[in-house]
Image (cartoon, rainbow, N blue to C red):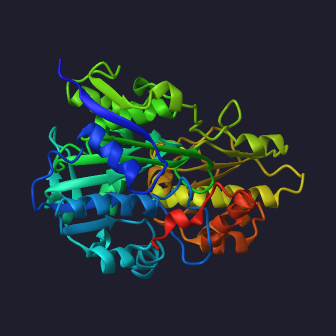
Amino acid sequence: MSKTAVAIVRYEKPVESVRKAVELCRGLDRMPAKARVFIKPNIVFWTRKVTFPKWGVITTSRMVEDIVILLKERGIDDIIIGEGIVGQIKDKETPAHAFESLGYNLLNKRYGVKSINVFEREFREVDLGNGDTLRFNADILDSDFVVDIPVLKTHAQTVVTLGIKNLKGMIDINSRKKCHNADPEKNLNYWVAKLADLMPPVLTLLDGIYTTERGPSFDGRVRRSNIVVASADVLSADMVGAKILGYAPSEVPHLVHAAKNRNRSCDLSDVEVVGEKMEEVASRHKYTFPYSQDDSLPLPMEKMGIKGLSYHKYDLTLCTYCSGMNGVVLAAIAFAWKGEPWDDVEVLTGKSMQPTLGKKKTILFGKCMYQLHKNNPDIREMIAIKGCPPEPKSIIKAFHQAGIEINPAIIENADTAPGFFMTRYEGKPEFEEAHFTVT
Ligand code: SF4
C-alpha cells in the first residue's frame, strides 16, 4: 500500500522550518512550473475597531511569507492570497484593513503577491456529485496549485478546523448557509467533507505556531506550540493535525466523511509521518464550550445561578452570522443577571431547535427560527428576531420584551468586544504580535 507523507516540524526559524516541512513531505512536487498559485490563509474574523487577539485565530503572516519565499525560489511569479472574511458582504474596508495590517500589501511590493477579497470576485457553481452543488471562488478553481494554510485549531462545531474546513472561506454566503442546513444526513460535516474534492493540487500547511482550544475565534484558549504540519494530501494533513490536537480522526465527523468519500481509512494506516513523532507534539485541546447537563445554559451561567432562562447549546445549523452574535448576547445576558429569576424564557437558535412545551416566552433568534416556528401552536408568547443576520436593535428589543434587560451598548458595539480578550495576553511574551505583520 502506498502511503502519503505528512511532515511534522518544530517551528524554529523563519523560512527554514517551513522549507524543511515542505521538503520532507515533497509538498511542492506536484506544482507545475510557472504555476498560478493561490494561497488560502485563515482570517476567520477581523475588526477595524479594536486590537484583538489574533494568536491561534488567524494564520500568521510569518508562515505566509515563508511559503511565498519558497514559491519565489521555485520561479513562481503569479501568486494570489485570497480570503472571504465574514462580515457585511458590502464592507470592502474591513478586508482591505486586514490585508494591510497583516502585511499583505508589503508582500505585494516585495514579491508581487496579489491579495483578493473573494466577495469582490466571481463565484462559480461546482457540482460535487450526489446532486450537491456549492458556489466557489473562481480564482482558486482556476489556479494551478493551492497552498492551504489554516491555523492548527479546534472548532466548537466541527471538532477541528484544518485544511479541508479552511476552504469554506472560498464559498459564497448562500453556500455557507447551505452547509449549516437542518438535514440530519446532509449536515455541516457532510458538506465540509466535500470542500477539497474539486480543488487543484493542494499543499496543506497547518500553522501551529499557536494552537487553540475551543476555537475557532478569539474567545478560545491559545497555546504557543511552534508546530508546522505539511502534506501534499489534505486529508492526511488533517488526520495528523487532529491527532496532534488530541482527537482520533474517527472522532471528527467531517474527516470520517472525507475518508469514506475517498475509500480511505481513518486509522492513519495509509499515512507516513516524517519528522517529529506525532505523540511527542500532541496534546489534548478541548473543542466544545461546556454547558449544563441538559444543555440549557452555558456552564458558567449555570454556576452564576441564573434561573428562568433556557438558552440551548448551539448546534451544527447555527451559521456564522448568528454564531458571531451568540457569544455577545450570552455575555450581555450574564451582565444583566441581578439574581432575580427571569420569566421562564427560552431562546432558540439555528435552524432546527424545537420549543419546550410550557415555556412562557420563546425568543426565536434569527430568520431561520422565525420561519420554522412562526405558526407553532406550542409557543405561548413568541418574540421573534426576524433578520438574517439578526439586527442589534431587534435583539435588544426582543430580550427587553422578555424581561431580560441586556445593556444595548454591549450588543450595538459587538465588534469591540474582541478587544476585551487582549487582557489575557498581557505580560506573556510568547504571544508575539510580530507574527502577524511583515517587516
Ligand atoms: S438567520 Fe442565522 S442561522 Fe439562519 S441563515 Fe441567517 S445567520 Fe444562518
From the top left corner, tell me how far across and down residue 362 is, in percent.
64, 51
Whether 436 is drawn above or below 208: the answer is below
Whether 394 is drawn above or below 304: the answer is below
Whether 262 is drawn above or below 265: the answer is below
Residue name at image x 77 percent, y 55 percent: 334
Q: Is residue 36 left or right of residue 85?
A: left
Q: Is residue 257 left or right of residue 388?
A: left
Q: Is residue 18 left or right of residue 71?
A: right
The N terminus, quarter of image: top left
Camera-nearest residue between 339 and 100: 100
Whether 69 is drawn above or below 279: the answer is below
Picture quadrant where residue 330 is located: bottom right
Answer with the quadrant where ligand 1 appears in the image: bottom left
Q: Is residue 293 left or right of residue 63?
A: right
Residue furthest out toward the right: 339
Q: How many numbered discs, if any?
A: 0
From the top left corner, tell me how far across and down residue 371 is, in percent.
44, 55
From the top left corner, tell me how far across and down residue 14 is, in percent.
44, 57
Camera-nearest residue between 281 and 51: 281
Picture quadrant where residue 218 is located: bottom right
